[in-house]
């Protein structure tokens, strides 16, 4: 199985990309955020409490935004798959 990562190795490599939320971009870039249990697509924006991580969901060709995410970690979105 040369060149094939085990599930555990793949998960460890992926987790190495998570960064502390304090280092996340606050320019409106959509990123992945997590509280350690749940992962959301989110962007820094105005929320009910001032500013925070607003959860973004892509539905029917448009971005919809929902409640604030209480995030501790972040990482860049992966690239879109090629067709």
Image: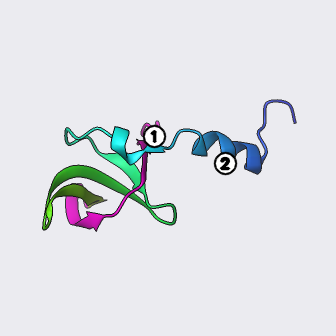
Please say if 50 is above or below 67. Answer: above
Q: Is residue 56 above or below residue 76?
A: below
Is 33 included in the stretch rendered in magenta? no
Residue under pointer 1: 78
Nearest to N terminus: mark 1 or mark 2: 2
Local crowd size for mark 1, using a 10 Å CA cut-off: few (<14), some (14–19), many (≥20): few
Q: How many discs mark residues in the rendered view?
A: 2
Q: Residue furthest front?
A: 22
Residue 80 image point, x, y percent: 42, 40
Where residue 57 appears, x then y in whole percent?
29, 60
Asked whether 63 or 38 is in front, the reply is 38
The residue identified by callout 2 is: 11
Q: Which mark is residue 1?
A: none
* Residue that appears at 28% across and 38% down: 25
Q: Disc 1 versus disc 2: distance between alpha carbons?
A: 15 Å
If the image is split into quadrants, where does the N terminus sit?
Answer: top right
Magenta-colored span: 60-83
* Residue 23 percent across, percent down from the top left: 36, 38
Q: Toward which corner of the image does residue 20 lie, by quadrant? A: top left
Residue at the spot x=13%, y=68% of the render? 48
23 left or right, relative to 11: left
* Mark 1, secondary structure of its residue: loop
Q: Residue furthest top?
A: 3
The answer to whether 71 appears left or right of 60 in the picture is right
Crowding near the residue tagged with mark 2, few <14, some 14–19, many ≥20 C-alpha atoms within 10 Å: few
Looking at the rendered image, the disc whose residue lies closer to the viewer, 1 or 2, is 2
Camera-nearest residue between 70 and 65: 70
Residue 82 part of the magenta-drawn span: yes
Q: Residue at x 74, y 43 (%)?
A: 9
Taking the spot 20% from the left edge, 42% from the top edge, the residue there is 28
3 and 27: which one is in front? 27
The image position of residue 45, as x and y in percent, is 16, 52
């Amino acid at each position: 199985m040369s060149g094939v990562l085990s599930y555990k190795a793949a998960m460890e490599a992926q987790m190495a990309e998570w960064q502390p939320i304090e280092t996340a971009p606050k320019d409106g870039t959509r990123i992945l955020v997590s509280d350690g249990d749940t992962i959301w697509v989110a962007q820094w924006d105005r929320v009910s409490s001032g500013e925070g991580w607003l959860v973004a969901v892509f539905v029917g060709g448009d971005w919809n935004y929902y409640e604030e995410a209480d995030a501790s970690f972040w990482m860049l979105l992966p690239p879109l798959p090629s067709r």
